[in-house]
Every structure is written in structure tokens, then in C-alpha cells.
Amino acid sequence: MSSINFSSRWLCLAMLVLSLCACATVHETAGGGEHPLPQFDAIAVFPVDNMTGGPAPAAAIRKHWLGKLQDLDLPVLTDARMEDVLTKHRIRYLGGVDAITGKAFKEEANVSAILVTALEYYNQADPPKVALHARLVSAGDNPEILWMDSVAISGDEKPGILGLGLISDFAVVEDMALSRLQSSLASWLAGGGEAQPVQSVKKYDPKLSYNAWPAPKGTTVSIAAVPFYNETQLKRAGDISQINFVRQLFRTQGMHPVEPGVVRQAMLGMRMIMHEGVSVRDADVLTYVLGADFLLSGTVFEYQDVRGRNGVPKVDFGVTLIDKNDRRTVFKSKSYNSGSDGVFFYDVGWEPSASVMAGKMAEAVVRKVLQKP
Amino acid sequence: MPGIFSRRFFFVLLLAGLTGALSGCAGKAGVYQDQSMDFGSVKTIAVLPLANLTKEAQAPDRVRDVLSTALMASSGIYILPPGEVMRGIISTGIANPSNPTSDEIVKFCKSTKADAVLTGSVREYGELRSGTAVANVISMSMQFSEGQTGKVVWSADTTQGGISIADRLFGGGGQPMNVITEKAVNDVIHKLFQ
């Protein structure tokens, strides 16, 4: 009798712990989203968008990436056919998919989805580093993100005992990064996009925040993220920050980010020039054109990765979320971190990649938005 | 007993009392506040671009971003987004946004529906060196102008960071710039709501 009581107590305790854990975490999909898995007629793999601000072997990375995709038996559109469509429609922007591009590929090449890949950071010198973003966007009039993931690997991220875990060959790092993306895509294709609890890391939380998020219940809110106002020396830090947030919004249940290519097309159509960020009038028009409920913008002050073993990566940005209905800021935050934050002994907790850090900081911001004010 | 009530004891006591009385007469250090202004009526503020008196080109924008977020987070006051502020500056044609005239402030507040504007300048931002000791420092001043008349109703300044005794003895470079900026901004906000 006592043993039954004892086991039932343990059961109750376990249930309590599980329920508390469920309360403490926000469920995110592992690159999944809420779309049904489409049957692909063909997939167009766009050339890798070089966001590094310098020369990079984007063509070689794409070739390697195509090899990984062939392993998944995906019906990839031939380069010649893709070039035909790009040339015919004078499509030059390959960092996203807008309505014109989506429609052209759907109608003329019978493409179901377009794979957009961006190279954020690349360094062949020891320790080698690579940071990549990839997303699969549906073709057609209304491009939507189907799958999205990012990966950043540094050769010195897991040095291990006596430095046995150090990687000095860039090819190894590149292969690891592409294999991770391949694995994530394969998991999504197999229907493995179920909600997974993700634990937050306290040190990446915003240092200052104002939250008046209206918390719409039972509906998925549409959020358009615009490129951040860039105050860094990295030419495309604003675009990189935008992609980081799009990825986090995509992974969060109840949030639906607008494809960045569609946002770009709308901004160009409106001749929108951001003077230190988005004005209320711009936000009003942009949310109306895109059919979005909220507009996410911000300013990136620092986005600094380091070459070699010396130096500390730093990321510093502010985020503003504007509500379409009352045309007011409902969330504002300030985040800054360096790779050495919270490191006291033997480099435990050291973060060598600005990309990973920015991703975690964006995740913390999105989590903060969802917390009750 | 005579030791306790000696003349010297009474003199020290008198000096302490006099010092306390004089410090009570003093105003808040480095703060000007118009007593006739009802700060409770201010609901929306625009933080205009700050003047940069430092060598660091990003300093005003960094401080402004922290100030805007901290003001929204710590008070019930709504801060206009920076893009909206810039739209207002362009539409009202303010020649020097970091130091606008009263007329320009009135025009700007009408255009953006702000109740008041915050202007200011960053006087020092970055590393400070003294011998072998190095530490970060920030020094800034802020003015609060009312939107209907453009009159300055509050003004304050603050300096945070710098080389401490510990920095001189043990080195270390002081606190990170972001932390010091937050401290300075919090000090300014504290003075505003005092």
C-alpha cells in the first residue's frame, strides 16, 4: 500500500514538473511552419546570395548544396531552365521571392517552390567559419515561406580536451553546415515540423524592453519584418538582422512572417526610403499593402564577427514592433551581447559566431514579445 | 563628563548642523526644472537626434536608442518611433534637429502630435586614459521642451563611468560602454521624474 502511495506521489510530482515545464517554454516549430507539405513538381535553387560584404565562393557552395539536395531526391530545376526564366523576366534580385518572380517560375517552369540560400559569413583562415541561411518559398502569386533554417559553424566552437575538437579545414566546416541544413530540410519533408520546446538562454534576453503586445488569442498574426536600419560597417547587416527575425517569427507558433522578397517588392513599389527607420505613415501603408497585422523594424548598431582566434564577436540592435490597428509601437527593446558574456572559466559558454548569437538574441526578443506585459 | 560636553564637541555638532542646513537649501545638482510645468500631462515625447561632441560617430544614435527604450520601459510615456521623428523633421524643415528653435519645436509637435521633445548632446563617449589606466566614460546633457510654446522646462546632465581607484590599482578597463550608457540614461530619467 505504501509502495503504491510512493509511486503515485512520484507520478504526481512528475506530472507537476512536466506541466510547469510546458508553462515555462514557448513552443516553436523546428523549421516547420503551419503549411501542409506540398507535392513538388520542381524546385528552383537560386544562386547563393552573398551577404558577406566581400568576395566569397558562392558558386562552389551552391554546387555543394545542390549535391546535398540531390541526396534528398528533390526534383531540382536545371540551371539552364532557371537562367531562361531569370533572363526573360529580368530578375536580378535573388535574395528573396516576390510575386513577379514566384508567378514567372510557377507558370513558365512549373516550379512549386524556390530555395533561397544566403551566405552571411565566410572565412577560410584558421579557424574556418561559415554562416548560412536557407528558406524554401512557395512559387506563385503569393509567395510564402514553407521551410526555413540557419546554421553557423566555427572551427573552434568545440575545441574539446587538448584542442582535439578544433577544425582547421574550411571544407569540413562547409560540409557540416550544409549537412545540418540538409538534415533540417529532410526532417521537414518527412513531416517532422512538430512543435518542440526550446529553452531560452537568459544572457541573450533584451537588456531593456517595453511590451504592450495585444496578444491576439486563437489567431495567427501576420508580421512584416523590414530590413533594419544599418549603422554598422557591414554592408548588409540590416538584411541579415531582418532574416534572423523572420526565421524566429517563422519558428514561433501563432506568428506568420511575410516573405522578405515580398516586403522588398512592396517597399520598392512605394518608393519607401527609411530615414532612421519606419515612420508611422510608412508602417500604415506597408501593413495595408502586405496585409500584415504588425510591422517589425529596428536599428542594428553592431554586427561584428572576428577573424582568427583573437577578438570577441559583438551584436547590438534595437527592435520596434508597430501595430497596424492603432498605429503605435507595441514592443520596443534593446539587445546587446558579446561572445564572452557569462564566460568565467576555461571559455565555457564562449560564443565564437556573431550569427549564432544574433539568432539567439532574436529568439529572446520574440519570446519576450509573447510574454505577458 | 567634561570631556563629552567640551567646547570642541559643541563646535563639531554646530558645524554638522550647519552643513546639513546648507545642503537642504541647495537645489538638485545639475538639474533645472520649471516648477509651473505639469509633467503629468505629457503623454507623447519625440526624442530628437542628439548633438555629437565626441569623436565617436555612432554615439548620439546609440544613446538615443537606449534613451527611447528606457523611457518607454520605465514610464507611461509613449516615444515616437525614430522614423516618425525623422519624417516630422523633414516635413517641418528643421535646419538643425539637435538644436531646434522654439518655433521649430512648436511646428514639429503639431506635425507629429507630440506633447514635448527631448533634445540633448553627447559630450563624451568612449575610452578615457590616464597614465596606464583606461576606462569607458559617458557624459551627456538633455533638455525637455514643451510642445505648445517650445520653451525648455527641464534640463539635466550626467556623467558616468571614468577611471576609478580600482581601475588605477588593478586595471581592467572599467565597465562596458553599453552598461555605462544605460546607467547614464537611467540617471537622466531619474532626474526627470524626481
Image (tube, coloured by chain):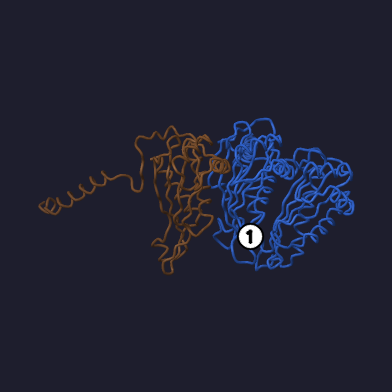
Where residue B89 appears, x then y in whole percent? 54, 43
- Chain letter of mark 1 equals A
Q: A157 left or right of B161?
A: right
**Identity of the residue furthest to the left in this view:** B2
Residue at (85% x, 51% y) in the render: A87
The image quadrant where one finds the N terminus of chain A is top right
Asked if residue A183 is positioned above or below residue B42 in the image, the reply reads: below
Mark 1, residue position: A305
Q: Quadrant of residue A102?
A: top right
Count of number-bearing discs = 1
Residue A6 in view of the camera: no
Shown in brown, the chain is: B
Give above or below for A311 relative to A192.
below
Q: Specify the amino acid type for callout 1.
A: Asp
For label 1, the SS is loop
Q: Residue B151 location in percent, x, y?
A: 40, 39
Residue A173 image position (x, y, % from top left): 74, 62
Q: Which of the 4 image quadrants contains residue A272?
A: top right
Q: Colour of chain A?
A: blue
Q: Is residue B28 left or right of residue A234?
A: left
Q: Residue at x 70, y 46 (%)?
A: A247
B19 or A259: nearer the viewer: A259
| Res. B97 visible in picture | yes
The C terminus of chain A sits in image quarter: top right
Which is more toward the observer, A111 or B12? Answer: A111
Residue at 38% across, 62% down: B165
**Relative image position of residue A345 (x, y in whole percent):** 55, 61
Crowd tier of the residue under label 1, counting other residues whose Cα lies within 10 Å: few below 14, some 14–19, many 20 or above: many
Q: Quadrant of residue A172?
A: bottom right
